[in-house]
Image (spheres, helix red, strand yellow):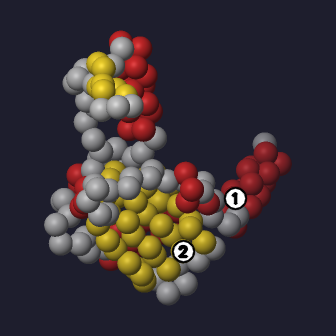
Amino acid sequence: MAIALRIAGLVLLLVGAAPPQDGARQARLMDRIERMLVLPKGAQPFARYGRNYALAAPDTVRAVYIVPPSPSTSTACTVVLPGDRSRPCSRAEIAEMAREENAAIAGQARAGQRRWYAKASSLPLVDDGGCTVVTIEYSISRNRILSTACNGVG
């Protein structure tokens, strides 16, 4: 019994002395950014954004905040053909677009939540969207937000 208690105490001592896991470091970085962040003019309220983070460089965190889109309920679809022609989408094409849309939505943080990505190249990529998409760059060593900007409008 005494040996078991000593082993348990040693395990607790070793665990307590262990360096924090990456998850704890990532949470601290996200907390720091969120405490000091001022969203740009035209941005949505903070709680509406899904917040996506990753290391862009050893000393830089990139965050992409996105107001998640609602899944489309429309089945209206047109395929543009050469020569100014078009045709309605087939059921299979509509189903494929719905799968792709659902996968894109599932691949990002939901409104009010945050997610850390292993690589910056895995962050959600949106080419436009105005202030429904905000990109942030943060310097870890300087504990400073380097830039905050809404996306352009396509």
Mark 1 residue element: helix
Q: Identify the residue at horizontal 42%, vertical 38% (top origin).
A: 104
Is residue 2 visible in the rendered image? The answer is no
Where is residue 130, by image quadrant?
A: bottom left
**Front residue (pair 17, 74):** 74
**Front residue (pair 87, 72):** 87
**Front residue (pair 73, 11):** 73
Looking at the image, residue 146 lies above or below residue 23: below
Quarter occupied by the N terminus:
top right
The numbered mark, 2 or 1, whose residue comes first in the sequence reads 1
Q: Position of residue 112 (x, y in %)?
A: 29, 50
Q: Left or right of 99: which side holds 54?
A: right
Specify the amino acid type for callout 1: Val
Local crowd at mark 2 within 10 Å, few (<14), some, or many (≥20)? some
Q: Position of residue 6 (x, y in %)?
A: 78, 54
Quarter occupied by the C terminus:
bottom left
Looking at the image, residue 9 lies above or below residue 143: above
Q: Left or right of 50: which side holds 48?
A: left
Is residue 107 visible in the rendered image? The answer is yes
Could you say which disc has been placed on residue 60 in the image?
2
Q: Position of residue 82 (x, y in %)?
A: 39, 31
Q: Residue furthest bottom?
A: 142
Residue occupied by mark 1:
15
Q: Identify the residue at horizontal 42%, vertical 81% (top origin).
A: 146
Specify the amino acid type for callout 2: Thr
